[in-house]
């Protein structure tokens, strides 16, 4: 079995790499000292990783049953090729991308919920939920991210187009 690795690759790369983390290491803390640093987490299995500080970007790749908690991210927080993940943004991130992932629970901060520019993009993924503070008491509510859509072809008018709507399975 490959060994756990946590190392920082200095300029011009400016990247933290965390590979093969497991629960055996306990809670792994990465302290980011500059917003130019990026984070790459790969092949974590049942691990908990906490990123403190504001980083440039985060890529979580090929992880299983792990938790990733970040303070703040300036560009994309991406979860790719993962299973049964939990991720949390304590402060801010402009977007979260979920790709080829089965089972992902995303916890968002009130700051993100109030940011109209924030978005979640998902492709080839299933079992996705988002939890965020809502209401006067700020209690967290959890909602599913749709994975089924209805597509319609429109041939009226000049150029044909395709429209999509979320399936009725996700109506409240």
Image (tube, grey):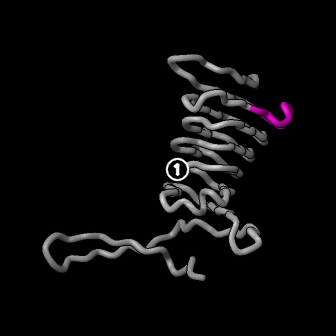
Check if residue 28 falls in the magenta segment: yes
Q: Position of residue 117 (x, y in %)?
A: 48, 58
Badge 1: residue crowd in 10 Å (few <14, some 14–19, many ≥20): some
Does 55 appear above or below 151? above
Residue 97 shows up from this direction: no
Where 31 sits versus 104, above or below?
above
| Res 135 → quadrant | bottom right
Residue 44 visible to an observer of this rendering: yes
Residue 125: percent from left, percent from top:
55, 56
- Where the C terminus falls, by quadrant? bottom right
At 78% across and 39% down in the image, what residue appears?
47
Residue reaching furthest to the left: 158
Residue drawn at x 25%, y 77% as measured from the top left: 154
Residue 112 falls left or right of residue 19: left
Viewer-side residue, 29 vs 168: 29
> At 75% from the left edge and 38% from the top edge, which residue is drawn?
49
Give x and y (percent) for residue 29.
Answer: 77, 33
Q: Say if 51 sits above or below 89 in the image.
A: above
- Looking at the figure, which quarter contains the N terminus? top right
Q: Please count the marks in the image.
A: 1
Confirm whether the magenta stretch covers residue 54: no
Asked where in the image residue 27 lies, by quadrant, the reply is: top right
Residue 81, position as x, y percentages in the image? 58, 44
What kind of element bears circle 1? Answer: loop
Residue lying at 75% horizontally and 22% vertically, measured from the top left: 3
Residues in magenta? 21-29
Q: What residue is shown with label 1? A: 94
């Amino acid at each position: 079995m490959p060994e756990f690795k946590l190392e920082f690759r200095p300029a011009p790369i400016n990247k933290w790499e965390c590979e093969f983390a497991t629960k055996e290491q306990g809670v792994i803390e990465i302290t980011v000292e500059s917003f130019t640093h990026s984070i790459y987490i790969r092949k974590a299995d049942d691990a908990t990783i906490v990123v403190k500080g504001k980083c440039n970007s985060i890529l979580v790749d090929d992880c299983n049953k792990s938790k990733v908690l970040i303070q703040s991210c300036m560009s994309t927080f991406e979860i790719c090729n993962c299973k049964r993940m939990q991720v949390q943004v304590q402060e801010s991130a402009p977007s979260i991308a979920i790709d080829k992932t089965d089972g992902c629970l995303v916890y968002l901060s009130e700051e993100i919920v109030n940011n109209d520019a924030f978005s979640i993009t998902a492709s080839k993924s299933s079992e996705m939920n988002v939890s965020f503070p809502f209401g006067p008491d700020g209690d967290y509510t959890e909602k599913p991210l749709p994975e089924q859509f209805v597509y319609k072809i429109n041939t009226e008018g000049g150029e044909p187009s395709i429209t999509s709507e979320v399936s009725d399975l996700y109506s409240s």
